[in-house]
Image (spheres, rainbow, N blue to C red):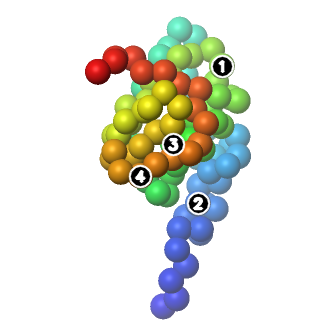
Amino acid sequence: MRKMGLKPIKNTLRLTQKNDLVVEYIRKRVAANDIVFLTGVGKVWPIIRSHTVLNVLHSVIDNAPLIMFYPGTYSGQDLHLFEEISDQNYYRAFKLIER
């Protein structure tokens, strides 16, 4: 059996499009005055990347605040998954609680 890596899974989920399965699932369930809580980011990494979901969600959900529970740290500019893996992607984010 040939190893194909994560690409076939990512293609199936269409993770870079506005109609990807994760974003579409969330978009269909968000109503007026809702708050979206995004959890499980560490469980689906590296198949689903938080910056990809957040960037696509930003373009389809603009009327609901989104809170992402992230298993790592946020420096104010970038995220460090599990406090070990540096992510150089841009996030429109801020900490809810300063430590």
| Residue reaching furthest to the bottom | 1
Q: Which amino acid is tagged 4?
A: Ile
Q: Which of 37 and 69 is in front in this view?
A: 69
Say which label, 2 or 4, has the lower sequence index: 2
Residue 37 sits above or below residue 2 on the image = above
Is residue 25 visible to the viewer in this orientation of the structure?
A: no
Can residue 75 be seen? yes
Numbered disc in front, either 2 or 4: 4
Sequence-wise, which precedes: disc 1 or disc 4? Answer: 1
Q: Which residue is under mark 3?
A: 50
Is label 2 in contact with label 1 (beta carbons under 8 Å)?
A: no
The residues bearing labels 3 and 2 have C-alpha atoms spaced at a distance of 13 Å
**Quadrant in which the C terminus is drawn:** top left
Residue that numbered label 2 is attached to: 10
Would residue 83 be found to the left or right of residue 37 on screen?
left
Identity, as a three-letter code, of the amino acid under mark 2: Lys
Mark before the other along the chain sequence, 2 or 1: 2
As drawn, 6 above or below 94 = below
In which image quadrant can residue 38 be found?
Answer: top left
Does 72 appear above or below 14? above
